[in-house]
């Protein structure tokens, strides 16, 4: 058994050494000092869509070609190789590097656009952190500013519209989340109102404006309804104010009946809060009167009468 195992290990070692001793054509070129031949092979691999191998050669050549005339074309292909491999983070850096390093190149406009486009592709789902979305908008706007007559401006503008729509949706859903959390802590209702108002300032043309205005009324109403009675009047008045704003801004809205009901209910809430406050004041006054009466009794009963001589 031991001999069989030993023979197997020996055979495996021989085969491994044989493989290691026979370098592939690609490995020979990769290890070669002939940069011209290496560059030609990298271009061939790129054209054959063997981007993984092409990248290995381009990365090696990028250091050796630094400062040389051929570096411009090499960096162009290097950036596109990363893009084809869907490494958008590194690709956008390389495209920007090309545009900054070779501003007069025939490919400068294209690379500036592609760098911005890679940011666009790297923009995450609306539920996640949107830092790259903002950077993509800035990069695309910069491209439009630098090349206002470019045929790519229309597409860049559309990408900006798409990205802003994502930010609008995130702003709306975040505010909606605050509203949903209000059942656990009423301060979230106020946070919902603030978040919605800020979103409408940041995105004045937001397509969710009608739904957001409704949610403002509902959030403020819920905030007032779940508050202590002595705070309700002011908070209901705010809800009524938001309801009036909604009715004025969206007179034909499908939500108009709901908003009017919230307004009426808020008015009733104010009347009820005032009644509760009056009752509370009455009870408080009655309680104080009883305390004062008891205090007088105690004073009278504890007074020591001095006998006449």
Image (cartoon, rainbow, N blue to C red):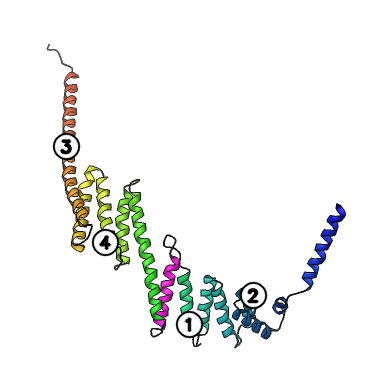
**Residue 48 counted in the magenta span:** no
- In the displayed structure, would residue 137 be above or below residue 66? above
Give the distance between the C-alpha atoms of the residues marked 4 and 1, in whole angstroms: 40 Å
For discs 3 and 4, the disc positioned in front in the rendered view = 4
**Residue marked by disc 2:** 53
In the rendering, at what x and y percent does residue 264 appear? 17, 50
The residue at the point 21 percent across, 50 percent down is 236
Residue indicated by mark 4: 210
Please identify the residue farthest to the left as the structure is shown.
Answer: 308
Element on which disc 3 rests: helix
Quadrant position of residue 296: top left
| Residue 129 is covered by the magenta coloring | yes
Q: Which residue is mark 3?
A: 279
- The residue at the point 40 percent across, 69 percent down is 163
Q: Position of residue 164 (x, y in %)?
A: 37, 69
The residues colored magenta run 122-148
Res 142 → quadrant: bottom left
């Amino acid at each position: 058994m031991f001999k069989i195992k030993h023979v197997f290990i020996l055979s495996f070692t021989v085969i491994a050494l044989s493989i290691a001793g026979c370098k592939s054509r690609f490995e020979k070129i990769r290890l070669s000092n002939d940069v011209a031949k290496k560059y030609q092979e990298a271009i061939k691999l790129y054209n054959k869509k063997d981007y993984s191998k092409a990248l290995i050669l381009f990365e090696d050549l990028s250091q050796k070609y630094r400062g040389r005339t051929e570096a411009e074309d090499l960096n162009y292909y290097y950036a596109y190789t990363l893009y084809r491999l869907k490494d958008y983070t590194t690709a956008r850096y390389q495209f920007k590097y090309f545009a900054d390093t070779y501003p007069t190149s025939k490919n400068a406009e294209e690379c500036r656009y592609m760098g911005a486009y890679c940011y666009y592709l790297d923009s995450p789902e609306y539920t996640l952190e949107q830092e790259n979305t903002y950077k993509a908008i800035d990069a695309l706007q910069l491209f439009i500013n630098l090349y206002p007559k470019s045929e790519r401006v229309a597409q860049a503008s559309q990408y900006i519209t798409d990205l802003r729509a994502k930010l609008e949706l995130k702003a709306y859903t975040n505010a909606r989340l605050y509203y949903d959390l209000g059942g656990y802590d009423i301060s979230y209702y106020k946070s919902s109102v603030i978040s919605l108002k800020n979103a409408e300032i940041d995105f004045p043309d937001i397509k969710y404006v009608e739904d957001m205005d409704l949610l403002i009324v509902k959030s403020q109403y819920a905030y007032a309804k779940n508050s202590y009675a002595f705070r309700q009047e002011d908070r209901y008045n705010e809800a009524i104010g938001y309801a009036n704003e909604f009715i004025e801004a969206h007179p034909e809205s499908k939500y108009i009946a709901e908003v009017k009901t919230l307004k009426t209910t808020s008015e009733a809430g104010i009347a009820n809060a005032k009644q509760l406050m009056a009752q509370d004041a009455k009870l408080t006054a009655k309680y104080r009167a009883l305390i004062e009466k008891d205090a007088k009794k105690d004073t009278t009963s504890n007074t020591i009468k001095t006998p006449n001589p």
